[in-house]
Amino acid sequence: MEVSTQTNRSSLPEREEVENGTDRNMFPSEVLSFCHRNGLLTELRTAVELANKCFQPTRWEARLERDPETGEEWVALMVIVPSAVVPVREAYHQYTTQWLHSAPASALYLIRISYDLI
């Protein structure tokens, strides 16, 4: 199952707006349900904040992905970045370092990030 939503950077709400109920405007219902079932909503918000801080994407999308062989599910956060390879690799390293220090171990495999250069 693959569900996605795209969000332009200019329309991304601040953390307070997310906490006040705009999660359903930012994320597909399948992503929110998965995060609620796994206690990951705070971590998803953190992942988006870190992605915005580190990558400064023009847009991003979140979708629920599932491995057809194992049935394993996770949230895939795709950031779309208009940049050269070297700065994006540095941004990815910065994101990964901060994500490893801020997220609980249970969230590390359930929320994954990738990027696409434009």
Image: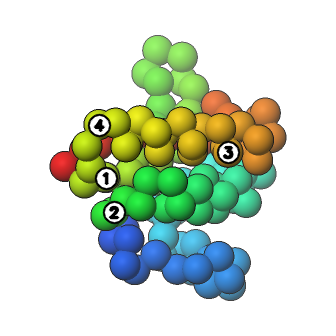
Q: Secondary structure at mark 1?
A: strand
Could you tell me which residue is drawn at 64 percent across and 31 percent down? Answer: 109
Q: Tell me the SS state at disc 3.
A: helix
Instruction: Give me the C-alpha separation between circle 3 and circle 4.
Output: 20 Å
**Sequence-wise, which precedes: disc 3 or disc 4?**
4
Near mark 2 (Cα within 10 A), the count class, few <14, some 14-19 or many ≥20, is some
* Residue depicted at 31% across the width and 52% down the height: 80
Dot in front, 4 or 1: 4
First along the sequence among labels 2 and 4:
2
Kindly report the distance in space between the C-alpha atoms of the residues bearing marks 2 and 4.
17 Å
The disc at residue 85 is 4
Q: Are marks 3 and 1 in contact (CB under 8 Å)?
A: no
Of badges 2 and 4, the one in the foreground is: 4
Which label sits on residue 59? Answer: 2
**Is label 4 in a helix, a strand or a loop?**
helix
Distance between the alpha carbons at the discs numbered 3 and 2: 20 Å
The residue type indicated by label 4 comes to: Val
For disc 1, the neighbor class at 10 Å (few under 14, some 14 to 19, many from 20) is many
Q: Is residue 42 left or right of residue 4?
A: right
Residue type, numbered disc 2: Arg
Where residue 14 appears, as percent x and y from the top left, is 58, 80
Q: Where, by quadrant of the figure, is residue 56 drawn?
A: bottom left
Q: Kindly report which numbered mark, 3 or 4, lies closer to the viewer in this rendering.
A: 4
Q: Which residue is mark 3?
A: 98
Q: What's the CA distance linking mark 3 and mark 1?
A: 19 Å
Q: Residue 17: give x, y in percent of width and height.
A: 62, 84
Outermost residue, top side: 69
Q: Are marks 1 and 2 in contact (CB under 8 Å)?
A: yes
Which of discs 3 and 2 lies nearer the camera? The answer is: 3
Looking at the rendered structure, the kind of residue marked 1 is Ile
Task: Label 2, secondary structure: give it.
Answer: strand
